[in-house]
Image (spheres, rainbow, N blue to C red):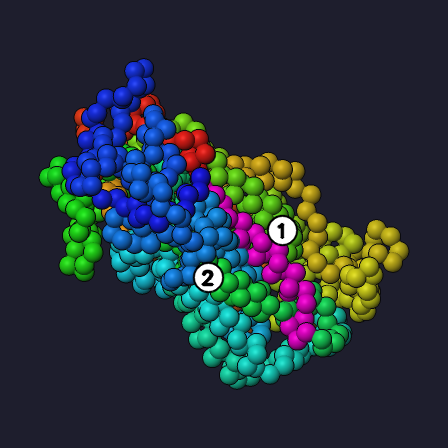
Amino acid sequence: MAMPQNSTRENGFCFTQALDFSCPSPHPGEAGWTLGAVSGRDGCSTPLSNGIASSGAPSPSGSSAKPLCTPTPAEEETPLEEGIKYVSAEGEELACGWGGFTPGCLQLCNTSKGVLFFLCVASFLQGMTVNGFINTVITSIERRFDLRSYQSGLIASSYDIAACVCLTFVSYFGGNGHKPRWLGWGVLVMGLGSLLFALPHFTTGQYEARSAAEVGVCGGNQSLPCSQAASSLSSYRFVFMLGQFLHGMGATPLYTLGVTYLDENVKTNYSPVYIAVFYTAAILGPAAGYLVGGMFLNIYTEIGREIDIAPENTLWVGAWWIGFLGAGAASLLISIPILGYPQRLPGSQRYIVMRVSEAHQLKDGSHKKASDPDFGKTVKDLPWSVLLLLKNPTFIFLCLAGATEATLIAGMSTFGPKFLESQFSLSASEAATFFGYLVVPAGGGGTFLGGFLVNKFKLRCSGIIKLCLLCTVSSLLAIFIFFIHCPNMPMAGVTQMYDGSALPGGHLNLTAACNAQCGCLQDTYSPVCGTDDIMYYSPCHAGCKRVSEKNGKKVYHECSCVDKALLAGSDKAEAGKCTSSCAQKPLLLCFMFVVILFTFLSSIPALTATLRCVPDRQRSFALGIQWIVVRTLGGIPGPIAFGSMIDKSCLLWQDQCGEQGSCYVYQNSAMSRYTLVAGLVYKVLGTTFFVVACLLYKPPPLESAPGSSDASENGTSDLQEHKPSLPAEEDI
């Protein structure tokens, strides 16, 4: 966007007459309409001023090179003073800065691209922290602070709870307030939440790993007594919950006010691209969180202290807290420039005037109330605002469609790595890496491509909903790939008997004659792969007597349960699962990529359709209500629904002193079948909701005037056919 010239005059949006959009173009042969001149009290012929200094600034109409306001000779001779001052009609400052500190160098960032950069950094940090670090370190936190799974589940859900509590308040009042200040303070609160999340590491004693070098071999199993009292460290879960609550509070403005701030300050055609870039950064954040968080987990939590256990040991706790310190500090820093942005960017008023409303038309005409400039500024308008949205069927069904998609995304992001781990017999870290390779190009690419398609084909609201429907149907067809599954790797006592025969009645039996004298316990699941390509529950259950290390990997010897018929000295087993040679692996990965791609491909178009089907003044509030619906019906219950479905396919459960813990081994065929059922249910629901939203959408009448709340751009193939063009350098 071109920078304004220095000027001491205040250029506002003051009109003394109504804008006349019906004036013909002064130049023959030019299509479209031009902004009619507005006669000011000083006699200056003033086309609509857009908040940019008048000296040499191009006209919004693009049909004339004349300045917005023709200066008088006295004004031309006025010497320029130092500093830049942008002022709108209401007298608000449009310069970038903090209070009275608005140096000229900062105005280089006072553009839509500058805002996009800082908001992308903020969304990247949010995604990296909440969806990356948290998911990566949750197991280490459970181990370090003696937490149970349901307690760590409460920690994770505290984020969504906070978001649901704050969304209505933030989106309603922030939508009519100073959005950058809400955004800046939100990012700052998010940073404080990250620092608080890391605090327990510094307020507890050193971590002592209760380990023994020979734990796991035959006769060497050791376990903690079941009567051990719960550790007092578990009370730190409330600190983690508070940190997550602050994360949720801080991120609430980011995906409601941040989206509408971008939408308001760029051309309508470019809005989907800006929003797509913003959301792509949010998707790349978790990928970075997994990579960086996994790297930190290879460092022992007590930095500088020597320890005799390796990261593969189940008692190892990595440096989970480093990522939160870095993300917290970065969030505090990035909040400073965001707080300095004005309520709207210089030049943005032209986009507001030229924007053509596509809001759904209610039969009783009550949608026109939202065009009142004073509407939504007080609490008394809150019930009426909610009622207007509830009376908008297109908005309601777009929200429900978003909830079904969010359910799938939340479920797949939580259990996708577990699905790959089970189907392809991978370690947890390998499965997470594989899933990251799928999500980054498919999720990030799909998100950006969705916004690009809306901009490329100049889609209107109804066309955008049809694009969402096409994407949903495509992913619905691709999800049938889950009819295919990889066979389970043979596991002694779980999928077959130790002699290779079938389990009688499907009942587990981990004890056999070859390990009966070992006294093996089921407290620690540490699978090993024998040279006979059969997995065993632990080295003890394989009857192994000795352990050595080769190329950084443990090798167990003299394993009495491993078939020795192959070669002499082949009674060995290596730590870890046996490698799967599933022939369906490339096909499964390919179609999973397609499902993820088309699921994310519809996200930005659906968001754009939501912004366009409601009145302009309700956009922030509509996004807030949509996020409440999406989180309440999708984000929160999604992992629970998928988890309960997948748990039905469990073959081997953890035994924690007589209580059922997590699942160790899943039946691959049942897991694929249940995943298919859950995916089909939600995809069919999503398709139905998009169809209904498209059928019930009622665009504004074609004869409405551009710029009014009832205007329509639905009668033309391109928005720019009936509105003035902007200079090329100001398009973005």
- Give the residue pinned by disc 2: 336
Q: Nearer the viewer, residue 232 or 93?
A: 93
- Give the residue pinned by disc 1: 433
The residue depicted at 22 percent of the width and 32 percent of the height is: 37
Category of crowding for the residue at label 2, using alpha-carbon neighbours closer than 10 angstroms: few (below 14), some (14–19), many (at least 20): some
Q: Position of residue 685 (x, y in %)?
A: 34, 41
Left or right of residue 666, residue 62 in this image? left
Compared to residue 239, the image places residue 353 above or below, namely above
- Residue 264 placement: quadrant: top left
Q: Position of residue 60 (x, y in %)?
A: 33, 33
Q: Element type at marker 1?
A: helix
The residue depicted at 72 percent of the width and 77 percent of the height is: 305
Magenta stretch: give its range.
Answer: 276-303
Q: Position of residue 75 (x, y in %)?
A: 32, 42
Q: Is residue 280 magenta?
A: yes
Q: Amino acid at mark 1?
A: Thr
- Magenta stretch, main secondary structure, is helix
Compared to residue 257, the image places residue 602 above or below, namely above
Q: Nearer the viewer, residue 372 or 475?
A: 372
Q: Is residue 386 magenta?
A: no
Outermost residue toward the left in this view: 364
Pointers 1 and 2 in contact (C-beta within 8 Å): no
How far is mark 1 from mark 2, CA to CA?
34 Å
Q: Element type at marker 2?
A: helix
The residue depicted at 17 percent of the width and 41 percent of the height is: 41
